[in-house]
Image (cartoon, rainbow, N blue to C red):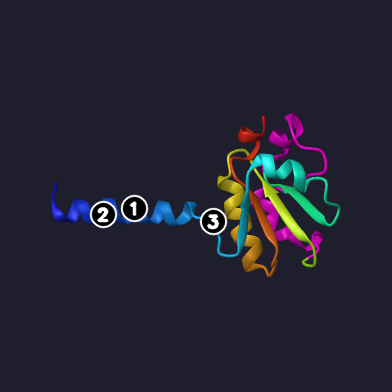
Amino acid sequence: MTYTNFIVIAGIALFLLLRMLPAKGVKNISTAELKQVLKEKNKQFVDVRTPAEFKSNHINGFINMPLHQLSNKANQLSKEKEVVVICQSGMRSTKASKQLKKMGFTNVMNVRGGMSAWN
């Protein structure tokens, strides 16, 4: 492997790793922890999967705000309450959590493993 190839591969790996890391200030919880959090009334629960995914299976209490619509629909959420975000695997909810933080939401919680870990 040439030095140039190594640099390109390392750069791609770093880029992918940084995209997967949780956003600064976002609390990551397991699905086991989510079961306790669901009992709390002062939180907002957002599922960022597609409407079809949400319709086929979702957790009671979660509202559907697909990731690609989140920036337009986030104004329906209160910045005063914590937002708990879930998706299928944890990838989209990580992106959504970062997006919410950039929009000024200070209390954001991401569910690791998403619905795949819930089932």
Disc 2: CA contacts within 10 A as few (<14), some (14-19) or many (>=20): few
Determine the image quadrant of residue 109: bottom right
Identified by mark 2, the residue type is: Val
Q: Position of residue 105 (x, y in %)?
A: 70, 66
Front-lying residue, 4 or 88: 88
CA distance separating discs 2 and 1:
6 Å
For marks 3 and 2, the one nearer the N-term is 2
Q: Which mark is residue 12?
A: 1
Q: Position of residue 106 (x, y in %)?
A: 69, 67
Disc 1: CA contacts within 10 A as few (<14), some (14-19) or many (>=20): few
Identified by mark 1, the residue type is: Ile
Q: Position of residue 32 (x, y in %)?
A: 68, 39
Find the magenta span and give its range: 49-78
Q: Residue at x 73, y 31 (%)?
A: 57
Disc 2 designates what residue? 8
Asked if the magenta segment contains residue 117, the reply would be: no
**Is disc 3 placed on a helix, strand or loop?**
loop
Disc 3 designates what residue? 22
- Furthest residue toward right: 41
- Furthest residue toward bottom: 104
Identified by mark 3, the residue type is: Pro
For marks 3 and 1, the one nearer the N-term is 1
Q: Is residue 26 above or below residue 57?
A: below
Front-lying residue, 36 or 58: 36
Asked if the magenta segment contains residue 58, the reply would be: yes
Q: Is residue 73 visible?
A: no
**Is disc 2 placed on a helix, strand or loop?**
helix
Instruction: Evaluate if marks 2 and 1 touch, with contact meaning CB atoms under 8 Å apart.
Output: yes
- Furthest residue toward left: 2
Determine the image quadrant of residue 53: top right
Q: Is residue 79 above or below residue 115?
A: below
Q: Position of residue 44 (x, y in %)?
A: 79, 54
